[in-house]
Image: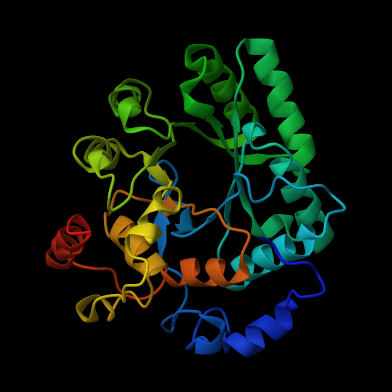
Amino acid sequence: MIRSPATALSRADFLKLAGLTGLGVMAAPSLGLAAAPEGGPIRRAIPSSGERLPVVGLGTWQQFDVDRDSAEMAQLREVLSLLFEAGGTVIDSSPMYGAAEARVGDLLADMQARPKAFLATKVWTTGREDGIRQMERSARLLQAKVIDLMQVHNLLDLPTHLPTLRDWKAAGRIRYLGVTHYTSGALDQLAGIIETETPDFVQLAFSPAVREAERRVLPLARDKGVAILVNRPFEGGGLFRKVRGKEVPDWAQPYAASWGQFFLKYILSNPAVTCVIPGTSNPRHVVDNLGAGQGRLPDEGERKRMIAYIETL
């Protein structure tokens, strides 16, 4: 549950207690936060432009679907503050996510933080005119004259929307275009789109437990110069349930100080991945997630050991 403002830490107090300056030093064990190594976030280039993004961003499904005057807004503001404090930028949303776009727009405006954010959202409807109306509404809700990344959500009416996205990109209304899906069953379709359309971004599901994307789509995206956003990195919390009551193995602790970092570091150790977008409304979790975007990543031998461990659970 999201805490009320009466029990939520202020951003300054949270950073002080956690001992964090841009996630640069050890977090306070009493807060249950994992250590993050010195240095700024790892960044990877968007192949189509060379622009570099921090490799850990933020998803907004469910967590940001709240009322404007709700108590939850204070904690969501905290999450965004911590994201920016650590050098993060990517925030992913969708019209499918209820009020999430509006809440992101409200918070960024209140915080005067729009320039810090790389805003990604989606078109999720059928028909050209309905798609245009929906994208214009998303821009209003996000309070953004230009949306950084517009994606066709779950490939819905893709042949209709792609020409519109290309027109919008040429006109400067969006900076990048992409496509998304969240099931492994759609990977062949995504591969075909990469081969024939070469979008700027493809968003897909990938985790240490669901690795089908590594077989074809990720290598293909790297070869074709397509950026990859990763959703469902924790399998809806299923990975945490598998390791409940277990400690991170000693051999993994040099690069992963928590289970969240273990899972995210595996994903990020694939060089085709541009950014992973775990969703959270919990300040502790966002700090831990962002820690996975710093320090070294596991090498190929360590990746195999991570998978072997997960497969025993």
Tally the numbered discs. Answer: 0
Tell me how the rendering is colored. rainbow
Q: Position of residue 216 (x, y in %)?
A: 21, 35
Q: Quadrant of the C terminus?
A: bottom left
Q: Position of residue 14 (x, y in %)?
A: 67, 81
Q: Is residue 129 left or right of residue 118?
A: right
Q: Residue at x 23, y 68 (%)?
A: 298
Give residue 181's quadrant in the image: top left
Closer to us: 147 or 8? 8
Note whether 247 is above or below 152 in the view shown.
below
Q: Residue at x 34, y 26 (%)?
A: 186
Q: Residue at x 63, y 89 (%)?
A: 17
Q: Is residue 132 left or right of residue 202?
A: right
Q: Is residue 296 visible?
A: yes
Q: What is the residue that sits farthest to the right in this orientation?
A: 69
Q: What is the residue that sits farthest to the front in this orientation?
A: 245
Q: Quadrant of the N terminus?
A: bottom right
Q: Position of residue 68 (x, y in %)?
A: 84, 49
